Image (cartoon, grey):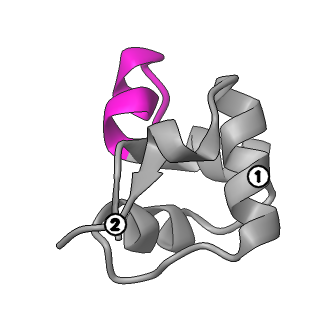
Amino acid sequence: MTNRLKILRAERNWSQSDLAEQLEISRQSVNAIETGRYDPSLPLAFRIARLFAQPIEAIFSEGN
């Protein structure tokens, strides 16, 4: 799965720690999602989508 999380975060000038705090997860989890080492659970994907006010499909997509 690929994602636009790093881009969306950068557009808002948020650090990984800032995003992690808002999502109530660790900074390491944010890093793992951004680098594709970890796919978020569906509830977490929904929280991310809500935070960025975008549909899940606009943030996450199938791919390498």
Q: On the image, numbered disc 1 is attached to which residue?
A: 46
Nearest the camera: 3 or 26?
A: 3
Q: Residue 28: x percent and y percent?
A: 49, 72
Left or right, residue 5 beside residue 30: left
Work out whether mark 2 precedes mark 1 in sequence or the reverse, and give the earlier one. Answer: 1
Image quadrant where one finds the N terminus: bottom left
Look at the picture and state if 21 lies above or below 55: below
Structural crowding at the residue carrying mark 2, measured as other residues with C-alpha within 10 Å and reported as few (<14), some (14–19) or many (≥20): few
Type of amino acid at the residue the image marks with label 2: Glu
Look at the picture and state if 54 lies above or below 20: above
Q: Nearer the viewer, mark 2 or mark 1?
A: 2
Residue lying farthest to the top in this orientation: 12
Element type at marker 1?
A: helix
Element type at marker 2?
A: loop
Q: Which mark is residue 18?
A: none
Q: Residue 27: x percent and y percent?
A: 54, 63
Q: Which residue occupies 49% across, 28% down? A: 14
Nearest the camera: 24 or 35?
A: 35
Left or right, residue 52 beside residue 32: right
Q: Which secondary structure dominates the residues rendered in magenta?
A: helix
Q: Residue 30: x percent and y percent?
A: 51, 62
Q: Residue 32: x percent and y percent?
A: 40, 74
Type of amino acid at the residue the image marks with label 1: Phe
Q: Which residue occupies 44% across, 32% down? A: 9
Instruction: Determine if the magenta segment contains residue 38.
Output: no
Q: Which mark is residue 62?
A: 2
Give the CA distance from mark 2 to mark 1: 16 Å
Residue range highlighted in magenta: 6-15
Q: Which residue occupies 34% across, 82% down? A: 37
